[in-house]
Image (cartoon, rainbow, N blue to C red):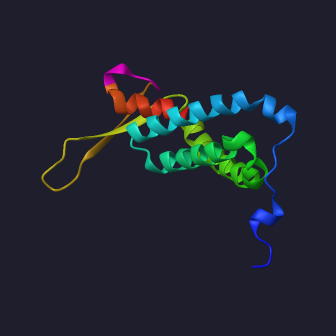
């Protein structure tokens, strides 16, 4: 390959206006780290993978006074769009309450009744994993 990424995107600091907002990047990275931990606690491995990738790219972009920001901005924007798309769908469907299925009365011939229960978005009686999943959806 004749043109490497190091040639096309020279390492240079972004404008001072962007550097002044660097603290907001640290706030966002803190929220992403909390989301990553909540998704692991809620056993949402696909969501944890996306959040972890966003966290890693965010750390790479912020280090060294944001000199690699131009190199990774497009990849980060695409990753943010994917994460938004995969997070907004469950949020919209479960905002009114989360549906749980229960199996009742399994007969000897193999038939079973399946009941649907609508539970609140947050429920202390459901335990840590349920509430961690709800929090990570938000």
Instruction: Give the camera-side residue of 32 and 22.
Output: 22
Vertical side of 130 occupied by 58: above or below: below
Q: For the view shown, which residue lies furthest in the bottom direction?
A: 1
Instruction: Give the camera-side residue of 133 and 26.
Output: 26
Q: Main secondary structure of the magenta part?
A: loop
Please say whether residue 64 is one of the residues in the magenta stretch.
no
Residue drawn at the location 87% of the way across and 39% of the way down: 15
Residue numbers of the magenta segment: 121-125
Vertical side of 77 occupied by 96: above or below: above
Instruction: Give the camera-side residue of 50 and 86.
Output: 50
Please say whether residue 123 is one of the residues in the magenta stretch.
yes
Residue 20 in the image: x percent, y percent? 80, 29
Residue drawn at the location 47% of the way across and 31% of the way down: 134
Residue 47 in the image: x percent, y percent? 51, 46
Horizontal side, residue 121 vs residue 19: left or right: left
Residue 120 in the image: x percent, y percent? 44, 24
Residue 97 in the image: x percent, y percent? 49, 29
The quadrant of the rendering that contains the C terminus is top right
Vertical side of 117 occupied by 125: above or below: above
Horizontal side, residue 88 vs residue 100: left or right: right
Image quarter of residue 117 = top left
Q: For the view shown, which residue lies furthest in the left direction?
A: 108
Residue drawn at the location 86% of the way across and 34% of the way down: 16
Residue drawn at the location 63% of the way across and 48% of the way down: 57
Image quarter of residue 32 = top right
The quadrant of the rendering that contains the N terminus is bottom right
Total labels: the figure holds: 0
Instruction: Give the camera-side residue of 103 and 68.
Output: 68
């Amino acid at each position: 390959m004749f043109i490497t990424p190091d040639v096309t995107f020279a390492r240079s600091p972004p404008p001072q206006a962007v550097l002044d907002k660097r603290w907001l990047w640290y706030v966002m990275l803190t929220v992403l780290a909390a989301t990553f931990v909540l998704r692991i606690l809620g056993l949402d491995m696909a969501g944890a993978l996306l959040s972890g990738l966003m966290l890693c790219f965010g750390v790479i972009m912020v280090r060294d006074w944001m000199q690699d920001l131009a190199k990774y901005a497009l990849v980060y924007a695409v990753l943010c769009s994917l994460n938004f798309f995969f997070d907004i769908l469950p949020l919209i469907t479960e905002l009114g309450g989360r549906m749980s299925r229960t199996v009742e009365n399994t007969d000897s011939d193999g038939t079973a009744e399946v009941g649907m229960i609508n539970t609140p978005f947050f429920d202390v009686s459901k335990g840590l994993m349920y509430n961690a999943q709800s929090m990570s959806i938000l």
